[in-house]
Image: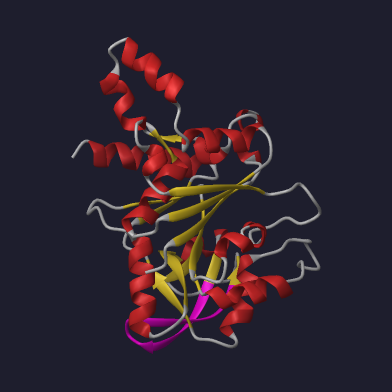
Amino acid sequence: MPTKAVIAVAGFGTRFFPVAKTLNKCMLPILTKPVVQYAVEDCVRAGITDIAIVTAPGQAGSQVRHYFTADPDTEAYFHDRGWDDKWRPAAHLQDLATFTFLEQPRDQRYGTAVPAMVARDFIAGEDFVLLAGDDLLLRADGGSDIADLVDRAWQAGVSAALAAATVDGTQAYRYGVLSTANRDADTHIFTGIVEKPRDWQKPTCFVNISRYYLPADITGYFDRLRPDPSTGEYQTTDVIEAYATDHETLVSPITGTYYDCGNINGWLAANNAAAGLADR
């Protein structure tokens, strides 16, 4: 099991403006916990001990650092007023993992691949998990979809894997759809990605949810990545497509339910679903 994860939270969150001018979208609450904490806890359940969180510079990034850092002054304030029970959910956030906070510079590079580039020294030649801090997976059984992702990759004998949500084919136009070839009924090998297809004909499709198990040697592919000529973006999916031409790469369907909390409807749906689980 890999021990390192890179969580990307450096986006502007423009769909949540104006509040996202000050509040990092990964800090939006799902009930009483920010979205990013669910990602951290999924990593921890999978046995990951070292987590690099790649933040934006300035105020938005400082919120994430503060949340996962000890705060003895506030803890003492709560204790002095007899609020130890209220403080308890925050008492051990800094102990969930060993955290490294990296700032993604506001330079000419942008896109989903940049956080892994920024975290190159942190990765330091080890296999790792890369995920977005504003995506949420909820499951009622207490399991870890990241652990499942890595376990299935090992069982398939491959060195890299993408987590995939299964959605109705009529919704394919909203996502990056993963093309696969079946080695057998339960082993789906990645063959490419089609961004937001308008003519998807199948009843369901696998879609990319920005959760990846990646090998140490993929950093060389990140080093060679060039921006998309039409958008200027550095895309993780371009790296994985290049890697998959040289190495079998698994597509692993998730067990939990996926919510894109980077948009208002997804965030609201995630809160409603989390409330339903809490009421059980």
Q: In this view, does 259 lie to the left or right of 25?
A: left
Quarter of the picture containing the N terminus is bottom left
Q: How is the image coloured?
A: secondary structure
> Picture quarter containing residue 272?
top left
Q: Give the range drawn in magenta.
A: 178-193
Which x, y percent locates residue 118? Answer: 66, 57
Where's residue 111, x and y in %? 68, 57
Task: Give the main secondary structure, helix, strand or loop, of the magenta stretch.
Answer: strand
Is 240 in front, or is 205?
Answer: 240
**Total numbered badges shown on the rendered structure:** 0
Q: Is residue 75 left or right of residue 9?
A: left
Locate residue 182, reporting x and y percent: 41, 87
**Residue most extreme to the top:** 81
Position in image of residue 114 (x %, y %)? 67, 59
Rendered residue at 58%/36% (across/down):
24
| 68 or 206: nearer the viewer | 68
What residue is rendered at 71% in x and 71% in y?
Answer: 223
Residue at image location 54% in from the left, 45% down from the top:
262
35 to the left or right of 107: left
Which residue occupies the extreme left position in the image? 280
Asked whether the viewer can see residue 26, the reply is yes
Classify residue 57 by image quadrant: top right
Residue appearing at x 33%, y 24% in the figure: 87
Vertical side of 10 occupied by 228: above or below: below
- Position of 5 relative to 259 (above/below): below
Is residue 122 in the magenta section?
no
